[in-house]
Amino acid sequence: MLHVRSIWNGAISFGLVSIPIKLVNATESHSISFRQIHTEDGGRIRYRKFCELEDREVTQGEIGKGYEDADGTIIPITEEDLSSLPLPTAKTIEIVAFVPGDRIDPLQMDAAYYLQASGAPAAKPYTLLREALKRSNKVAIAKFALRGRERLGMLRVVGEAIAMHGLLWPDEVRAPEGVAPDTNVTVRDQELDLADALMDTLGEVDLEDLRDEYREAVEEVIAAKAAGETPRQAPEPATGGKVLDLMAALENSVRAARESRGEEADDHAEVKPLPPRKTARAAPKQTGGKKSTSTAKKTAAKKTAAAKKSTAKSGQSGQGTKKTAAKSTAKKTTAKKSTSRKRTA
């Protein structure tokens, strides 16, 4: 049995079945609270409540509720006014429907409570509702009034107890307008494959293993200062440049995730192509084949041009050689004729 003070007493209305229950908080906050102080001397800063008409401080017992009208008029509202509201949910959690759990948008989830059976008469109907919820694989939608307003609730089974999650009214959930990027962005299959590889590498986690490291660090600072010691300083953050290449950032993330799990990190993150998805995507460009063909064509063209140049040079060289040989022959012939004439004379 929970030894927690109940915040509401009433009953669950399940058709004509009434189940007396107590409402207790299912969660608790472990955050560290701070006080406001005067920085010069450490004195506490306190707020005093004054009546603006009498200009005097009033006690908590003198403070009530009031609604401010549009013209500034204050209309007093007493607890008796609220407790006598003509609503069936004033002291009753009225179940209005049963729906599959996935019909509830997590954005509507609010505070969580346990519904504790109140006394022996509640044991049988409480168990009946719990087992009916188990067998149906559904959750119960209910209406109840708490802290001056009517609310929606979702009842579900947690262990051997019935829990209730407060739900926001549908019109209290804002539409996500203007939140998503307003520019057209194309995500390549290679990038999605790397993102999937990163998700697979990170894997699952047992929520019980997660802890509030910020709270632990604050507690460490408080303990050090209370002992007159200097708190341990945080390490300097890495001053790396911006990673503009998304693929490189994903590859580095996969590599880091593997190293953190004690796996061997390759020079290049291994990405296994995923099977085709149901959603049609644009086929990735076959850049490899095109580049090879283009390179081959360019290489062939270069070789052809080089061959032509070589041939032209060879031709020019040959012609030059012939001309030189012709000139040499002509000179020799002229010399012979000159010698012959001299001898004849």
Image (spheres, rainbow, N blue to C red):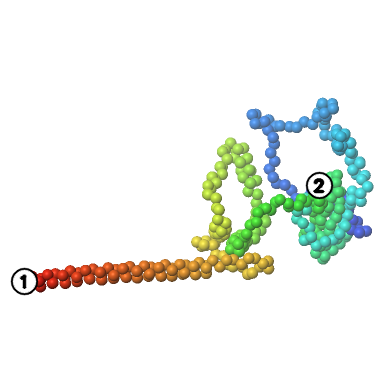
Residue at x-position 80% and y-position 64%: 137
In the image: residue 11, left or right of residue 322: right
What type is the residue that disc 2 sits on? Arg
Q: Residue at x 64, y 29 (%)?
A: 40
Query: Percent x, y for residue 185?
Result: 63, 57
C-alpha gap between disc 1 and disc 2: 151 Å
The number of callouts visible is: 2
Q: Is residue 180 visible?
A: yes
Identify the residue at image location x=77%, y=56%. Answer: 105
User: Position of 238 compared to 200: left or right?
Assistant: left
Q: Is residue 271 left or right of residue 125?
A: left
Q: Mark 2 or mark 1, which is nearer the start of the sequence?
A: 2
Q: Quadrant of the C terminus?
A: bottom left
Q: Nearer the viewer, residue 239 or 14?
A: 239
What number is the disc on residue 345? 1
Q: Position of residue 327 (x, y in %)?
A: 21, 69
Residue drawn at (82%, 54%) of the image: 153
Residue 262: x and y in percent read 55, 60
Disc number placed over residue 5 in the picture, else none: 2
Q: Dot 2: what SS?
A: loop
In this view, 288 is above or below 252: below
User: Is 228 situated above or below 195?
Assistant: above
